[in-house]
Image (spheres, grey):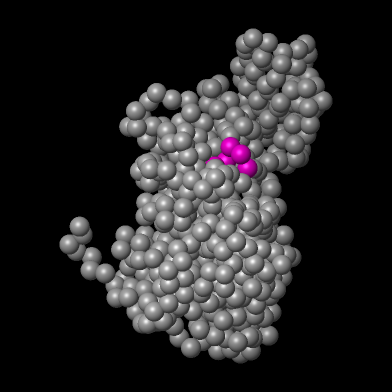
Amino acid sequence: MFNKFDVLETINMVEKEHLDIRTITMGISLLSCIRATAEETATAVYDLVCKKAQNIVKVAADLSGEYGIPIVNKRVSVTPVSLITAAFPEKSILVGKALDKAAQTLGIDFLGGYSALVHKGTADYEEKFIRTIPEVLASTSRLCSSVNVGSSKSGINMDAVRLMGEIVKECAHLTKDNDGLGCAKLVIFCNAVEDNPFMAGAFHGVGEGDTVINVGVSGPGVVESAVKAIPNADLTEVAETIKRTAFKITRAGQLIATEASKRLNARFGIVDLSLAPTPARGDSVAAILEEVGIESVGTHGTTAILAMLNDAVKKGGVMASSRVGGLSGAFIPVSEDIGMIEAAESGKISLDKLEAMTCVCSVGLDMIAIPGNTSASTISAMIADEAAIGMINNKTTAVRVIPAPGKKVGEWVNFGGLLGRAPVLPVHESSAEKFISRGGLIPAPIHSFKN
Amino acid sequence: MHAVVTVTGKDKKGVIAKVSQFLLEKNANIEDVSQTVMDEYFAMIMLVDISGIQEELSVLAQECAEMGKSIGMSVHMQHEDIFNAMHNV
């Protein structure tokens, strides 16, 4: 028989502390769908995705019912679409729409992979593909897009960085009636991972198998409660407590991942150990940092606590799962975390502090609203800064900012649901135009002499 | 195959009777029970064999939660593996 306290602890985690499985994401290779024309390819893509993932919603509901743990999102990630449409890049939009339609047919929440990997150079077809992103994101609802512009091995493709600044602006413009919602579905990466189950940056890497199941766990509320229970503990004990809590959360994810892959006839890929917040109270990463002992996220000490949290989550999680991957870290999206929203509203967190925080956790400048009149080159410069942090530190970093159309500092964007809401934060006004217009490649860094 | 049934809430008469009756009707066999009342707070954990149930566990779990609501208690039925996974190394 089980220990009574263990059983009640699990129930309490779900009922009071928002423990959930954030996502079951099926990665599907689209390479077999390449046909002679865009129209035929789009049809093949739609058919394949609908066939492979036909049971994902039902299986998730069954597992959720059997184990008593909510499974919040069902998602699909696919091979970067730029590879599928290389022969007819201008018509990539047809494949994008087919994917969005497949997502609707399946009843899944998001589908990621309208992506291009251009970290060392942008092929002609890739540039044409990237230029279709704004229109595709404006005319679809569940499709997500990402572009990898740098890596530790190859450096940063500054031509792509410059282009992405313009693309972000155009995404905002084409979705101006929805606060620039298109930008919330577009991530610009450095060191993108191939097995990430989280959106908007998920895609199914070409090094992956045919069909895999990746699971993202969550549970900031559970960690917050665990830390709250030890108000006088020193930081060694706090780290240990976080580690133990992460272990339990991840074990739940591992169980769901193994069962889901069996029932969906796919290989088990990885469990992603990220603490992913939602805008609900009691489901906030910022609240954990504050519980450890800072008055507000964004003040001095934030980076140190975040570093400890991120590391402790990984240590507990790695022990709990047979295969760990994805992004695996604490997420700090501003609009999706009630603690971050409040800190941004009261001016206690700045873009500069957020950038510093991304040095020690995944994933980057995430879901941050900036003034609508921010120039493309300034956005490119933000992307370059984040990419540099990722490149030098051998980690994934990303930028998902929303230049809120027609809005100024202090005004709000509101996307609803998991994407949340956020006040517009100020950016530096001095220009980086000359730097960005130079283009070229920032060479890969030397990996010895690490000081 | 086993499931864990957890019943919590304010103590009142007939909770065990009602839950056991429900499980009997569903052809689930109670193998172990642990139950306490602390400050009028009722907590019971049952290990039940569900090999003989006629419906899917997810459906039964839903019915179980509804039965719980009808008697003003919080009742969960979950596959035992979730507890094995989370609390045993």
Depicted B24 relative to depicted A80: above or below: above
> Which of the two residues, A187 or A52, is positioned nearer the viewer here?
A187
Farthest residue to the front: give it. A430
Q: Which residue: 70% across, 39% down? A: B57
Which quadrant of the structure image shows residue A75?
bottom right
Residue A288, position as x, y percentages in the image: 48, 38
Q: Which residue: 40% across, 37% down? A: A243
Which quadrant of the structure image shows residue A51?
bottom right
Residue A326, position as x, y percentages in the image: 46, 57
Residue A191 visible to an observer of this rendering: no
> Which of the two residues, A86 or A120, is positioned nearer the viewer here?
A120
Principal secondary structure, stretch drawn in magenta: loop
Q: Which residue: 68% across, 46% down? A: A62
Q: Quadrant of the C terminus of chain A?
A: bottom left
Image label count: 0
Residue A341, position as x, y percentages in the image: 57, 47
Residue A306 visible to an observer of this rendering: yes
Query: Which segment did they paint magenta?
Result: A280-285
Q: Quadrant of the N terminus of chain A?
A: top right
Depicted B22 relative to depicted A130: above or below: above
A418 in magenta: no
Depicted A63 relative to depicted A408: above or below: above
Residue B83, position as x, y percentages in the image: 54, 32
Which quadrant of the structure image shows residue A81?
bottom right
